[in-house]
Image (spheres, rainbow, N blue to C red):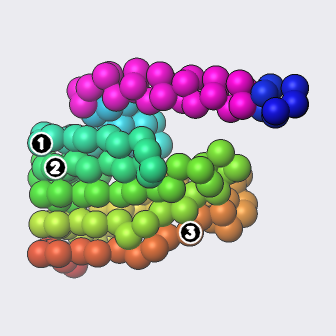
Amino acid sequence: MNALQRSTLRIGGGLLVVAALAALFLQQLGPEFYKQRLARAVADSTGRTLSVDGSLTVEWWPRLRVHAEKVALANAPDFGPAPMVAAEEVEVAVATLPLLIGRVSMETARVRGLSASLVRRADGSTNWDDLTAARAADADSKAGALATLALGGVDIEGARIDWQD
């Protein structure tokens, strides 16, 4: 074995050890840490409260997989205290390696026990207006971002949608 091969093996082995230690560290943070981070990220991007009242598990390899139970997204202000969207279970998995090159390759997103309450008032305002307005403004600044997203599908089981017009 020549010096180049030995160096390559040492570097590769070192990277594997670092990756394994990082994964172990992240796994030890616990579900409460992830619940708080997820709720903060949703609040920052939507202005709404996300609650995860059940278990939350995160797996890092071979896919970044998040499984949450008893998830609810708060309704818009002035549309009442009941959540706009709730689900008994939500699971999303993303291939880990494509993330390193900025590509999101998502498997089938699974939602069980979905309950959505959609409201449109007489003046035409809806309880999702604030979500779509924020997304439209954000889309202008992130043009082409969806070109790097691959979604395997959405599997919804046991959905109930209430529509008030």
What kind of element bears circle 3? strand
110 or 48: which is nearer to us?
110
What kind of element bears circle 2? strand
Q: Residue at x 13, y 49 (%)?
A: 70
Residue 117's x, y, as percent? 18, 66
Residue 2's x, y, as percent? 87, 30
- Against 110, residue 62 (above or below) is above
Q: Residue type at mark 3?
A: Ala
Q: Quadrant of residue 127?
A: bottom left
> Mark 3 = which residue?
150
> Mark 1 = which residue?
54
Q: Are marks 1 and 2 in contact (CB under 8 Å)?
A: yes
Q: Residue type at mark 1?
A: Gly
Q: Which residues are magenta?
A: 9-32
**Which class describes the residues within 10 Å of circle 3: few (<14), some (14-19), or many (20+)?**
few
Q: Residue at x 87, y 26 (%)?
A: 3
- Against 155, residue 117 (above or below) is above
Q: Is residue 141 left or right of residue 164?
A: right
Residue 124's x, y, as percent? 36, 72
Question: Sequence-wise, which precedes: disc 1 or disc 2?
Answer: 1
> Mark 2 = which residue?
69
Residue 52 lies in the magenta-colored region = no
Q: Residue at x 32, y 41 (%)?
A: 58
Residue 123's x, y, as percent? 33, 70
